[in-house]
Image: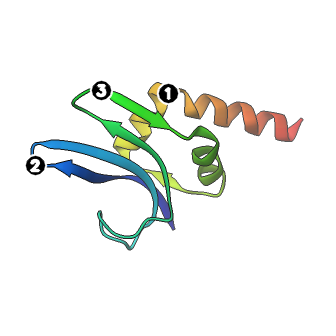
Amino acid sequence: MVKLRLKRCGKKQRAVYRIVAIDVRSRREGRDLRKVGYYDPIKNQTYLNIPVILYFLEQGAQPTGTVQDISKKAGVFMELSSNQQTKFN
């Protein structure tokens, strides 16, 4: 199973997180399948590759709680629901 989770990068006390698609059995800093964005909590910046995130969500990937909150703020799930509606029409 694939999850969308945060991968810690940066220096001590200056954490920056990459949002990655990763196998559930891998550890936090393990090898990721694909980088799909980043999150900087200090500067409060995010970058999300929305088409890739939508692809992984459609394939059944499960986001962690924090990634889900970041994605909600960016409106990813609204795009996901609109894409699913157009497929069925």
Q: Looking at the figure, which quarter contains the C terminus?
A: top right
Dot 2: what SS? loop
Residue at 26% in and 43% down? 16
Lower position in the chain sequence, tag 1 or tag 3? 3
Answer with left or right where residue 23 lies relative to residue 53.
left
Residue for badge 1: 74
Q: Is 28 placed above or below 15 here?
A: below
Residue at 22% in and 49% down? 10
Lower position in the chain sequence, tag 2 or tag 3? 2
Query: Tag 2: Cα neighbours inside 10 Å, few (<14), some, or many (≥20)?
Result: few
Which-is-in-front pick, marks 2 and 1?
2
Q: In front here: 20 or 81?
A: 20
Toward which corner of the image does residue 24 lie, by quadrant?
bottom left
Dot 1: what SS? helix
Answer with left or right where residue 69 lies relative to residue 1.
left
Counting from the top left corner in percent of width and height, residue 3 is at 46, 58
Q: Which mark is residue 12?
A: 2
Residue for badge 3: 44
Lower position in the chain sequence, tag 2 or tag 1? 2
Which-is-in-front pick, marks 1 and 3?
3
Q: Which amino acid does the dot numbered 2 rest on? A: Lys
Q: Which amino acid does the dot numbered 3 rest on? A: Asn
Q: Which amino acid does the dot numbered 1 rest on? A: Ala
Residue at 35% in and 28% down? 45
